[in-house]
Amino acid sequence: MTTFVVDACVVAKWFIPEIHTESAVKLLGNSHDLIVPDLLYSEIGSVLWKKVRQKEIDAEIAREIIEGLYEMSLELIPSKPLLSAAFEIAHTLDRSVYDSIYLAAACSVNAQLVTADQKFYKVISESPLKNNIIWVTNLV
């Protein structure tokens, strides 16, 4: 079984049809262990709030997505112990600490971060951390 850390861009695609949703959904099932930092829940909540505010989805659908997220078997890791490493990644590569928390999580468990954040992927894939990240459509 392969272990991956997944970011909020990927998780959102499990619930809201967008570009690369089909690839993101391939992560679900019994063939992968999926890890997320606790930050994920705040980020998904924010994504849903924005989509409701922009009238892309109904508030009731957002509530159902939140409940569905709670039912998923994701291994949760705290972000507090990841903060120092995330800050160094963010500082060195000029990326946000939020995004860097996910990459720090992947590094901490010797896994790859699956992302659908194109800007983040591009920067990391050209850095010494390139082996710790994978683009969502490149999953086998």
Image (cartoon, rainbow, N blue to C red):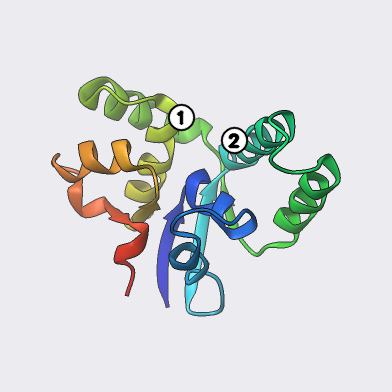
Which disc is residue 43 wearing?
A: 2
Q: Residue at x 41, y 61 (%)?
A: 4
Q: Is residue 28 above or below residue 92?
A: below
Q: Is residue 78 left or right of residue 138?
A: right
Q: Residue at x 33, y 68 (%)?
A: 139
Mark 2: few/some/many CA within 10 Å (<14, 14-19, 20+): some
Instruction: Tell me where residue 5 appears, x and y as whole percent.
Output: 44, 54
> How many marks are shown on the rendered structure?
2
Q: Nearer the viewer, residue 118 or 79?
A: 118
Disc 1 designates what residue?
98
Residue extending farthest front: 55
Which element is circle 1 on? Answer: helix
Which quadrant of the structure image shows residue 121? top left
Instruction: Tell me where residue 57 appears, x and y as whole percent.
Output: 73, 43
Q: Which callout, 2 or 1, points at the residue further toward the start of the chain?
A: 2
Marks 2 and 1 in Cβ contact (< 8 Å): yes
Which quadrant of the structure image shows residue 86? top left
Q: Is residue 107 left or right of residue 47?
A: left
Quadrant position of the C terminus in the picture: bottom left
Q: Nearer the viewer, residue 1 or 113?
A: 113
Quadrant position of the N terminus in the picture: bottom left
Which amino acid, mark 2?
Answer: Glu
